[in-house]
Structure formats: C-alpha cells, structure tokens
Image (cartoon, rainbow, N blue to C red):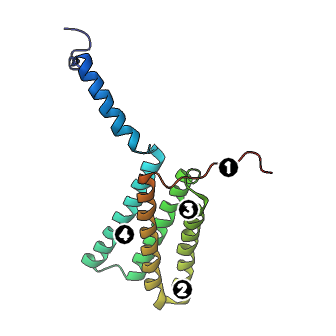
Amino acid sequence: MGENSVFFPRPFILSSSHTLIFKAKAVILFSTQPKISMKERLNTSLHSLSLIAVGGMAAWAVFSGDLSSQKLMTYLILFLVIIEIFSLILIGKSYPESHTSFKIGMIATFLILLGIKRMLPGLFVPLTITALAVNFLYNFYTNNKRRKGQFKRRKEKKYKL
C-alpha cells in the first residue's frame, strides 16, 4: 500500500470525453453565479444569527416569564448594535455607500431607542419592534440583491475632471 492510500481513496480516472463533459458542466454552473466572498458569507451568517437571537430571546421571555419586554428589547438592541458594527467592518468596503449609510443610521436608531426607553417608556417597545422589522427586511433585501450580483460598490474614477 502506498503512503497516501490510508488517508485518500484511489483517484477515479475519467476518459477524455468524460472530462470534457465535466468541465463544460462546471463552466456552465460556475459562470452564471456571482462569486461570494468569505466576508459576505460571514455577513449573511451574522444576520441569520441576529434573527435567531431575536426569536430565541422572544421565546425565552414568553416561556420563562421573568423578563420584562423593556429588558428584552434592551438586550436585543445591544446585541444587534454589536452585530451591525461587525457587519459594517466586514463588508463596508464592498457594498454601496447607500448600504453603509443605512446601516449607520440603523445603529444610531437603535442607540437612540435606548434613550427613548427612559424618556417615553410607553413608546419604547412599539418603536423598537418597528426598527427591528425595518432592519430585518432590509437585511433580506440586500441578501437577495447580493445573491443576484446586483449589489456592489461602484468603482471610483481615479481622475475626476
């Protein structure tokens, strides 16, 4: 037995006609889909994690009953601010400026909501739910546009006249 036979199976040898068909299928499959970088995949995972966290915290509040809605929303806001900051660090340079501006605005909205918690506690929960809904809808919108390859930053001209 060879040195690699313990760890690796014996390679499957294709005839030349099989390799041409395989290469043609691979070219068709991979040429139509836009390339997704690791940063963009991590960004999508962060947004999925934030959605799972919102569902988990809401389920915890419903089933345990020891967490008030204002505390729940406060924890969710702090968690989402951290996730959005990491998201901007990851993909801020590859997504359009409008995306970056919107995300900075959402972070500011979440932080302002923490101030509203003390000033107008009656409006805190409805405004927070609205901000969360807008944030998640925008995340789904950008993820779908990114998958289609339509959501990229325009290249800046080096020389402007």
Seen from the viewer's position, the closer of residues 98 and 149 is 149
Q: Which residue is mark 1?
A: 156
- For image coordinates 42% across by 69% down, the residue present is 137
Q: Which x, y percent locates residue 25? A: 30, 33
- For image coordinates 26% across by 14% down, the residue present is 4
Task: Compute the Cα span from label 1 to label 4.
Answer: 38 Å
Q: Earlier in the sequence, mark 3 or mark 1?
A: 3
- The reply to whether callout 3 and callout 4 are in contact (CB within 8 Å) is no
Seen from the viewer's position, the closer of residues 65 and 93 is 93
Q: For the residues carrying marks 1 and 2, which lies nearer the camera in this image? A: 1
Q: Amino acid under label 2?
A: Arg
Q: Quadrant of residue 24?
A: top left
Badge 4: how crowded within 10 Å, few (<14), some, or many (20+)?
Answer: many
Q: Which x, y percent locates residue 120? A: 52, 90
Label placed on residue 28: none
Q: Which residue is mark 2?
A: 118
Q: For the residues carrying marks 1 and 4, which lies nearer the camera in this image? A: 1
Q: Which residue is mark 3?
A: 99
Q: Which residue is mark 4?
A: 54
Horizontal side of residue 25 vs 34, given as left or right: left
Q: Earlier in the sequence, mark 1 or mark 4?
A: 4
Q: Earlier in the sequence, mark 2 or mark 4?
A: 4
Q: Amino acid under label 1?
A: Glu
